[in-house]
Image (tube, rainbow, N blue to C red):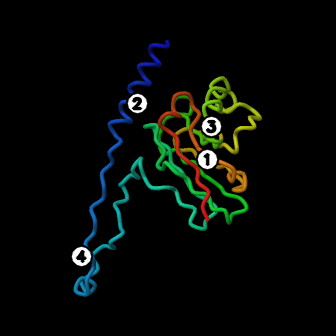
Amino acid sequence: MKAYLALISAAVIGLAACSQEAAKPAEAPATSAASETAPAETTAPADAAPASEAAPADAAAAPAAGNCATTVEANDMMQFNTKEIQVSKACKEFTITLKHTGTQPKASMGHNIVIGKAEDMDGIFKDGVGAADTDYVKPDDARVVAHTKLIGGGEEASLTLDPAKLADGEYKFACTFPGHGALMNGKVTLVD
């Protein structure tokens, strides 16, 4: 059984590595006065992207930009769509919504977001492995600043945190489903 799980894990990691280079959208040419008078059906906005275009795994930080909420997507390839979550200091509460864009059930490809100090993440992972019945987060773990429940494909969950709790160090976020944290992690940054 262990060999079977190791083989599956290796296959998933291999597939994730193969998909790391996402297609980059072509840059739209600058509009000129002549193109602004062209018929509407022959022009498209410069910032329009095809609806089918997926966000790359190495997308820029999920910005706070004065907002007090952000959305992070996770998929069946064990990837978050961002490596950084920016939390605005101006917010009294900040909400992070996790959306699982894949189709796999949580028993085989469940994802969560767990936030803790960077130096505490190894301990949070180790203690979470034995906590399958509590979404791979040790109950009442003081090192965990906030976390979502574990979700499967097509589901979403949210967490709310106090930005003031992030003022004293370097923080990270990760998925604590066994084996996912090595690929599914990033930093949480407090911004003005």
Q: Residues at badges 3 and 4 in contact (C-beta under 8 Å)? A: no
Residue at mark 3: 119
Disc 2 secondary structure class? helix
Question: Which numbered disc covers residue 42?
Answer: 4
Residue occupying the point 77% across, 35% down: 140
Mark 3 or mark 2, which is nearer to you? 3
Q: Earlier in the sequence, mark 4 or mark 2?
A: 2
Spatial distance from mark 1 to mark 4, Cα to Cα?
49 Å
Spatial distance from mark 3 to mark 4, Cα to Cα?
54 Å
Residue occupying the point 42% across, 23% down: 8
Residue at mark 2: 13
Q: Which of marks 3 and 2 is nearer the N terminus?
A: 2
- Specify the quadrant of the image occupied by residue 90: bottom right
Q: Is residue 107 above or below residue 52?
A: above
Q: Earlier in the sequence, mark 1 or mark 4?
A: 4
Residue occupying the point 72% across, 56% down: 164
Q: Residues at badges 3 and 2 in contact (C-beta under 8 Å)? A: no
Spatial distance from mark 3 to mark 2, Cα to Cα?
24 Å
